[in-house]
Image (cartoon, grey):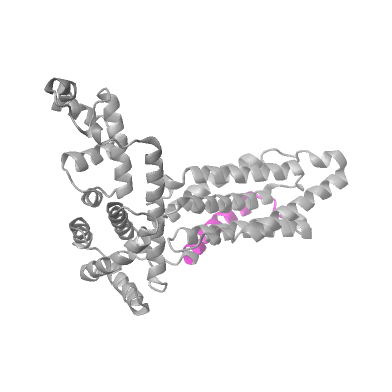
Amino acid sequence: MTASSAEEWGRLMAAAQAGDGGAYARLLREILPYVRAIVRRHHAAPDRIEDVAQDVLLTLHRIRHTYDPARPFTAWLGAIAHRRSIDALRRKVRTDASETFSPVAYETYADPGANKEIAAHEDSAVLAEAIAALPPGQRQAVELLRLKEMSLAEASATSGQSVGALKVSLHRAIRALQRALGGKVDR
Amino acid sequence: MTDETESLIAHLTEGLQPVRRLAPPWLRAAIWLGIVAVLGAIIVLRFADLAMFVHRIADPRLALELTGILLTGILAIIAAFELSLPDRPITWSLLPAPSFVLWLGSSGFSCWHQWIVRGPDGLGRGETGDCFLWIVAFGVPLAIALFVALRQSHPLSPGPVAAMAGLGVASLAAFLLQFFHPFDATFIDLGLHLAAVATIVVLARAAARRGLNAV
C-alpha cells in the first residue's frame, strides 16, 4: 500500500458514503489484501483468516457512516480489522476451552441398527418443533446456515448478524437442540 | 479472492444507499451537553436556593471542587463520543483524569477541614443521606439519554465508551446536587458521592453492548 493508494481509498470511501456502488466495490476489493495482512497477525488458518476478513468487510459496511474523510482511511480500517481479529481470537479461545474436536463423532456406525437412535431424531416434525422453540437469533442461524445451507457471509448479509454472532448463535442453537432431543444432534 | 468473499462484496455493493455521515464527536458532545445544560438550568432556577449557593461559592475551596466535578463530567462525555469511533485510541479515556483528581483533592481537603473544625462530627454523614439516591436518580436517565446519542456510532469496544459515559453523567448529576447540598461534605458524604458515581459506571458498563448497539 502506498500513500497515494491510501488517499485514493479515502476518496473511494467518501464516494461510497454518497451511494456510489462502483467505487465501493472497487474499494472493498482493493483493501482485502491489507485487511488479510492485519488479520494474519492474529490468525494462521487460511479459512479463519478469510472468515475474519469477511467479518471486517461486514463491520466496515455497518459503520461506514462513522468514517470522516478528513482523517486517514487506513487508521480507521486498521482499527476495525484489528478489533475484529481480537474478537475472533477471544471467541476461538472460549470455544477451544469448552469443546474437543473429534472427527469420529461426525461418522455414523457401520451397523445400520446402531444408527436407529440417531435416525429417530431425523423425524422432521420433532426437529421442526425443537427449532421453532429456539430464540429468534438462534433459530435464524440454524435456518440460514443448516437448512438453507448458506455460507457464513451470505447468512450474515441476509440476517444483519455478524459472522461471529452467527457462529455463536449456531453453537448455542445446536447445544439447545441437543438438550431438547436428548443429546443426539449432529453438528 | 474466494468466491464467497466475492459474492459478499457483490451483496454489500448492490443497490448501495447513501449514508448520513456522523458529525464530529466534539460537536455531538457539545450539542448533547448544551441540551443537558438547558434542562439543568431550568431545574436549578425553578427549585434551587440560589442565594445560598452564591454565598457558598464564595469559598475558593468549594469553587475549586465544583470546577473539578463539572470538568470531569464535560471531559468524560467528550471522551465517550471520541471513543465511540473505531480509530480513536484508548488514551482518550485519560481526558477526565486531571479534573477527577482535582475533584477528589479539593473534596478531600474540604472533608479534612470539616474534621478539624467539627471534630469527630466532621467524619460522619452530613445533614442528609440522600446524595447517593440523588446522583443515581439523575444519573440513570442522563445515561440513557447519552446512550441514545452514542449508539449511532455502533462502537466496536463498548466497554470504555460506557465507562466514560457513566463517569460523565454521574459527575454532572453530582454537580447538579451541589445546588441542593447546603453544607460542606464530610468524608462519609464524599464516600457516598463516589459510591454513586461507581454505581452508575458499573451499571453503564453492564449495559454497554446492548445499550450502545455495539457491532
In this view of the protein, which residue sits in the foreground, B167 or A177?
A177
> Residue B144's spot in the image, x, y percent?
48, 47
In this view of the protein, which residue sits in the foreground, B54 or B186?
B186
Residue A166 in the magenta stretch? The answer is: no
Figure check: A135 above or below B179:
above
Q: Is residue B131 left or right of residue A76?
A: right
The answer to whether residue A32 of the structure is visible from this angle is: yes
Please name the residue shown 24% across and 63% down the image.
B17
Q: Is residue B120 left or right of residue B156?
A: right
The residue most toward the bottom is A4
The picture quadrant where one finds residue B10 is bottom left
Q: Is residue B169 left or right of residue A151?
A: right
Residue B41 in the magenta stretch? The answer is: yes
Report the magenta residues as a range: B27-52
Please name the residue shown 39% across and 55% down the image.
A42
In this view of the protein, which residue sits in the foreground, B197 or A148?
A148
